[in-house]
Amino acid sequence: MNLERLNPRESIGFLTWKVARIHANDLAARFAEAGVKITVEQWRALLPAYKADGLTQGRLCDMLSQEKTGVSRLVAALEKHGLLRRESGDDDRRVKYIYITDKGRELVDFTLDIVQESRSEIARHVDPEEFAVCKRVLWQLIEPHLDENCCLKREP
């Protein structure tokens, strides 16, 4: 195999992963500085409940594109922090519905400006017009694989 063909500068996977890691690390540092006591991954799991309270845990898995066990751990940690609560369904006790607490809503509200500042800082060296093109191109790659709720489409 010719390893020179695996140039990271030519790999959309590497480039998008690296940008995501840079943003997550920056955001984690900003959260720590602001006294926010949850991880970036936990924060990302909190957002869907903030936007649409009463999701099932399975739906949250779809929205985060993560496996059930990982999401279950995230939800358990958020529940321990008092940011989410889970309730069993009336018809099926195995189905868990997720609700954000007032404390969870306050945390999201508090962190929104922090997240926006981080996003702006990450892209500060990029020409705004070029950045807009970049986002449009990334959406062209992503969109065919997502449903209307930005969840991965399930194969029939």
Image: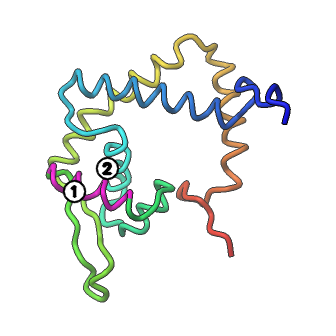
Residue 68 in magenta?
Answer: no
Tell me which residue sits at (37%, 58%) in the image.
71
Q: Amino acid at mark 1?
A: Leu
Answer whether labels 1 and 2 touch (C-beta < 8 Å): yes
Find disc 1 in the rendering and name its residue: 84
Quarter assignment of residue 2: top right
Question: Magenta segment range?
Answer: 70-81
Q: Is residue 108 above or below residue 76?
A: above
How many numbered badges does the structure rendering display? Answer: 2
Tell me which residue sits at (16%, 54%) in the image.
80
Q: Disc 1 to disc 2, how far (Cα)?
A: 8 Å
Q: Amino acid at mark 2?
A: Leu
What percent of the width, then of the height, locates residue 20? 51, 33
Quadrant in which the N terminus appears: top right
What percent of the width, then of the height, locates residue 92? 31, 86
Marking on residue 46: 2
